[in-house]
Amino acid sequence: MPRFRSRFAALAGIGATFFLTITGVAAAAPAALPASVLESCPASSVCFYEHQDFGGTVLVIPAGAAYPDLRAFPCAGCRSSKHNNNNGTWSDQLSSWVNNTGQVYCWYWHENYAGRNDTVMNAGTALSYVGKTPNDQASSIGPC
Ligand SMILES: [Ca+2]
């Protein structure tokens, strides 16, 4: 019986180790971005990407900045699938983003922080694709 108890205790110990390892990996996974993505988006910045999966041209927005009209920022060669009158600017181009700041950011469908802001960008998170309907719609951005 003592022998059984010691084996059981050893198995219980292994189980506890597995559990901690698995939960540790699971908790860290959402923040694990490819190194190339983190290199393209400096610390203390929000980054807008022209394409999904953090591809294409990048717009780097310093922490604390708010831009009421993304048409002010040139995006050479960028073409919007939704509003081609804004081709060549950063308005209506956003397909994925990284929020490398400590603040919650929001992007808006229209200029001057108007329109839907259902895509809250929590601090320290990223989204590889905003989704079919919100794709190529962002026209302003700022802290929420
Ligand atoms: Ca796009």
Image (spheres, helix red, strand yellow):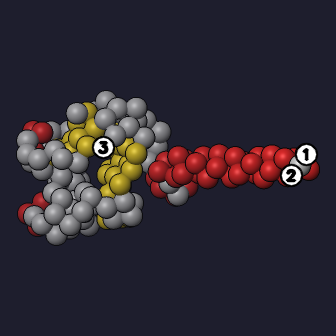
In this rendered view, identify the residue nearer to me: 62 or 105.
Answer: 105
Residue 45 in sight from this viewpoint: no
Mark 3: C-beta under 8 Å from nearest atom of ligand 1: no
Disc number at residue 127?
none
Q: Is 112 in front, or is 32? A: 32
Q: Is residue 132 visible?
A: yes
> Residue 97 placed where, x, y %?
34, 52
Residue position marked by numbered label 1 in the rendering? 2
Residue 125 higher or lower than 102, as above or below: below
Number of the front mark, 1 or 3: 1
Q: Residue at x 55, y 55 (%)?
A: 35
Q: Position of residue 19 (x, y in %)?
A: 64, 49
Quadrant assignment for the C terminus = top left
Q: Secondary structure at mark 2?
A: helix
The crowd level at tag 2 (other Cα within 10 Å; few <14, some 14-19, many 20+) is few
Is 141 placed above or below 87 here?
A: above
Residue labelled with disc 2: 4
Q: Which callout, 3 or 2, points at the residue further toward the start of the chain?
A: 2
Which residue sits furthest right?
Answer: 3
SS category of the residue bearing label 1: helix
Give me the residue at 39% from left, 50% from top: 126
Q: Amino acid at mark 3?
A: Met
Residue under label 3, please give it: 121
**What amino acid is found at the position of numbered circle 1 in the picture?**
Pro
Horizontal placement of 126 versus 118: left or right?
right
| CA gap, disc 3 and disc 2 | 53 Å
Q: Are marks 1 and 2 in contact (CB under 8 Å)?
A: yes
